[in-house]
Amino acid sequence: MIKGLYEAHLPVKNLDFSIEFYKKLGLSLAWRDDDTAFFWIEEGKSWLGLWQGDEYQTPYHPSLRHIAFEVSYEDLKQSLRWLGSIQVEAVPFGRRTSIEPFIRPNQGNASVYFNDPDGNSLELICYVPIPDELKRITDKLSFEEWEKLIDNHNNH
């Protein structure tokens, strides 16, 4: 199921300063919000996530204990079944309560999360081609919601 490394993460103290630094290294800014930024390492294939914050204020900063593995879209759709078959439980992401895989239209990817035996955050993630007019959607969508939305979009 795992095809390669999708992303790595680093904590940063000042996101704006770090963005300028990584631009100087030749990385291309892919996406940012108030406290995170993602740079392409290899465009369309792998990226680096920068997370602004004081990692000492919390017992664990997600950027220090997280790896995302690249999988295919179809594999991600079957990920809960696969994880169950190897006795691994999926966990909700962030404030979500559902463990179901979900689509992030504004980022062009889909994910499901789980932990290793030491509590490190692991993710199965795939790229999802997003039409430009749907990239404004910031809600996280289930595969069912996404596929209905994309079918409606393609039929209009």
Image (cartoon, helix red, strand yellow):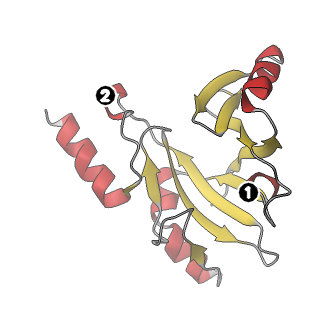
In contact (CB < 8 Å): disc 1 and disc 2: no
Query: Quarter of the image holding residue 69?
Result: bottom right
Residue at horizontal 64 percent and vertical 70 percent from the top: 114
Residue at horizontal 48 percent and vertical 66 percent from the top: 96
Q: Position of residue 31 (x, y in %)?
A: 58, 31
Residue corresponding to mark 2: 133
Number of residues whose C-alpha sits closer than 10 Å to that of mark 1, classed few (under 14), some (14–19) or many (20 or more): some
Give the structural element (helix, strand or loop) at label 2: helix
Q: Nearer the viewer, mark 1 or mark 2?
A: 1
The single residue placed furthest to the front in the displayed view is 57
Given residues 14 and 130, the one toward you in this image is 14
The single residue placed furthest to the bottom in the displayed view is 87
* Quadrant in which the C terminus is drawn: top left
Number of residues whose C-alpha sits closer than 10 Å to that of mark 2, classed few (under 14), some (14–19) or many (20 or more): few
For residue 62, the mark is: 1
On screen, 50 above or below 141? above
On screen, 124 above or below 155? below
Q: How many marks?
A: 2
Check disc 2 and give the amino acid type: Glu
Q: Position of residue 146 (x, y in %)?
A: 32, 51
Give the structural element (helix, strand or loop) at label 1: helix
Check disc 1 and give the amino acid type: Pro
Q: Earlier in the sequence, mark 1 or mark 2?
A: 1
* Quadrant in which the N terminus is drawn: bottom right
On screen, 50 above or below 76? above
Residue 70 is left or right of residue 8, and the answer is: left
Given residues 28 and 21, the one toward you in this image is 21
Query: Quarter of the image holding residue 40?
Result: top right
